[in-house]
Image (spheres, rainbow, N blue to C red):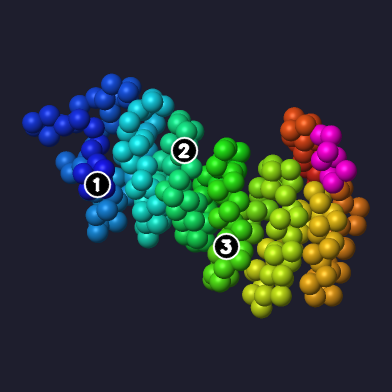
């Protein structure tokens, strides 16, 4: 379907939007132009209003609604919006879509992941980054996780600006925190990540250390092996961080996902108690 022809709902001859059989109700629209037209308007306010309406529309649609498919292929463009407010609303809409229906593992999803990392995770707006991270974490627990892994690995191996590398490392670290080394094996990334420790950019080096500190808990051997390429000062810093740290490596073979979640929650509770 052509992007410009995508309908917001069924239109009668008066141009009034009727209720769809798969939506509980249709939210009021401030502008008479179709949502898909406003979404690519040169006016930032029109784009923001369009994304706000899309969030409302998705919120009332049932999981089997064709409305999701009508807009799905346009999401890479929505997520790339230079207007931070419209971009944030686009991420909200994508989260609703992902929660309500199965996301196809295709080139559109790949483009969405790339934009979430490259554009949204590098945004100067805290809420945009937080919601982008939520989206990526959600993709990490679905059948879409393999495509996410590929995209992350690509960004670590191609020449990109430092802020994209930092964003990629932050996502990888957060995935480890949420899912552990079983789903995002440290051995697959440790060597590549450690090599980035030679960067002249301080934020990149800090992100590298952050990942390796978390990775040590899940795969001590792989991280120690990867340290050979790090500067002496970085090795010493890591060793200091690891002193007394719990390694989860020996638990991986016989621990269920439920055990893992329970243990991580208890550990988090213990940390909070110690900081009081």
Quadrant of image for the C terminus: top right
Quadrant of image for the N terminus: top left
- Relative to 81, 28 lies left or right: left
Q: Give the range drawn in magenta.
A: 248-255
Determine crowd level at label 3: few under 14, some 14-19, many 20+ residues with C-alpha closer than 10 A.
some
Q: Mark 3 points at which residue?
A: 155
Q: Name the residue under label 2.
A: 103
Q: Disc 3 vs disc 1: Cβ atoms closer than 8 Å?
A: no
The circle on residue 65 is none
* CA separation in Å, label 2 and label 3: 22 Å
- Which residue occupies the foreground of this view, 48 or 19? 19
Q: Is residue 72 magenta?
A: no
Give the residue displayed 82% in from the left and 40% down from the top: 252
* CA separation in Å, label 1 and label 2: 20 Å
Q: Is mark 1 on a helix, strand or loop?
A: loop
Of all residues, the one furthest to the bottom in this rendering is: 200
């Amino acid at each position: 379907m052509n992007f410009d022809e995508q309908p917001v709902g069924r239109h009668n001859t008066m141009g009034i939007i009727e209720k769809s059989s798969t939506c509980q109700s249709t939210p009021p629209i401030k502008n008479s132009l179709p949502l898909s037209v406003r979404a690519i308007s040169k006016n930032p306010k029109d784009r923001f209003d369009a994304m706000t309406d899309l969030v409302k529309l998705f919120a009332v649609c049932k999981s089997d609604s064709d409305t999701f498919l009508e807009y799905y292929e346009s999401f890479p463009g929505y997520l790339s919006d230079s207007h931070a407010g419209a971009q944030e609303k686009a991420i909200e809409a994508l989260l609703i879509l992902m929660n309500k229906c199965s996301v196809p593992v295709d080139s559109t999803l790949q483009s969405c992941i790339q934009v979430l990392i490259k554009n949204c995770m590098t945004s100067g707006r805290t809420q945009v980054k937080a919601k982008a991270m939520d989206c990526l974490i959600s993709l990490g627990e679905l059948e879409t996780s393999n495509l996410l892994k590929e995209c992350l690995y690509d960004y670590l191996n191609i020449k990109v600006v430092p802020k994209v590398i930092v964003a990629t490392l932050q996502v990888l670290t957060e995935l480890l925190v949420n899912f552990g080394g079983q789903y995002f094996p440290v051995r697959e990334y440790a060597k590549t990540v450690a090599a980035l420790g030679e960067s002249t950019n301080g934020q990149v080096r800090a992100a590298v250390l952050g990942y390796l500190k978390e990775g040590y808990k899940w795969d001590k051997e792989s991280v120690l092996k990867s340290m050979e390429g790090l500067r002496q000062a970085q090795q010493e810093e890591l060793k200091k961080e690891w002193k007394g740290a719990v390694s989860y490596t020996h638990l991986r073979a016989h621990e269920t996902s439920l055990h893992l979640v329970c243990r991580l929650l208890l550990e988090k509770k213990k940390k909070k108690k110690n900081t009081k």
